[in-house]
Amino acid sequence: MLSAKKIPKILWTEAVNWTFYILKKCPTFAVKDITPQETWSGVKPSVDHLRIWVYLAHTHVPKININKLDNRSTICMFLGISEGTKCHRLFNTEIKRIIVSKDVVFEKKNTGTGEMIMLNK
């Protein structure tokens, strides 16, 4: 599926990590209506923070990295949640690197073609 969508191989591990993150929050057949995370911690996991993989997002650019009239945000693609923190893992399409940021605003209407933005630049 990843090669059909033309996702670069550098992001394939991020796709696997996000898949396992979501699977920990899904009920299993072994124990009905209980998630693996709930079995371990005793608390039902929240799914309010879950997003679609490679969903378009804007992240804040610190003032030290920009000039007065430059954009204050940059377009990225959502890759997942950083374990142990409340930060988002994002792929910065301009510098072609994975970044971790807490200051993220997600697009309300997403085209669903996040991978095309990365390839066209």
Image (cartoon, grey):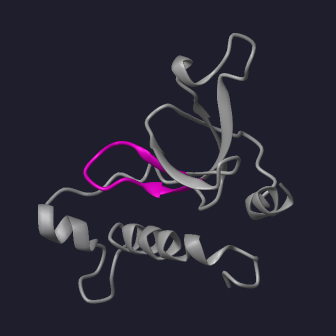
Left/right placement of residue 5 relative to residue 65 reads right
Counting from the top left corner in percent of width and height, residue 41 is at 13, 61
Q: Is residue 41 left or right of residue 69?
A: left
Vertical placement of residue 75 versus 35, above or below:
above
Q: Residue sitting at 38 percent across and 67 percent down?
A: 21
In percent of width and height, residue 64 lies at 52, 19
Q: Position of residue 46 (x, y in %)?
A: 35, 51
Say which quarter of the image contains residue 86: top left
Closer to the camera, 94 or 19? 94
Which of the two residues, 99 or 40, is positioned nearer the viewer here?
99
Left of 81 or right of it: where is 94?
Answer: right
Residue 8 colored magenta?
Answer: no
Residue farthest toward the right in the current orientation of the protein = 120
In the image: residue 9, left or right of residue 46:
right
Q: Residue furthest bottom?
A: 30
Task: Give the number of marks.
Answer: 0
Report the front residue among 12 and 28. Answer: 12
Point out the stretch of residues depicted in magenta.
78-90
Figure quadrant of the N terminus: bottom right
Q: Which quadrant of the rendered structure holds the C terminus?
A: bottom right
Q: Residue furthest top?
A: 68
Report the residue at 49% width, 48% height from top.
Answer: 99
| Residue 84 belongs to magenta span | yes
Q: Position of residue 16 (x, y in %)?
A: 47, 77
Q: Name the image quarter holding residue 29.
A: bottom left
105 to 37, vertically: above or below: above
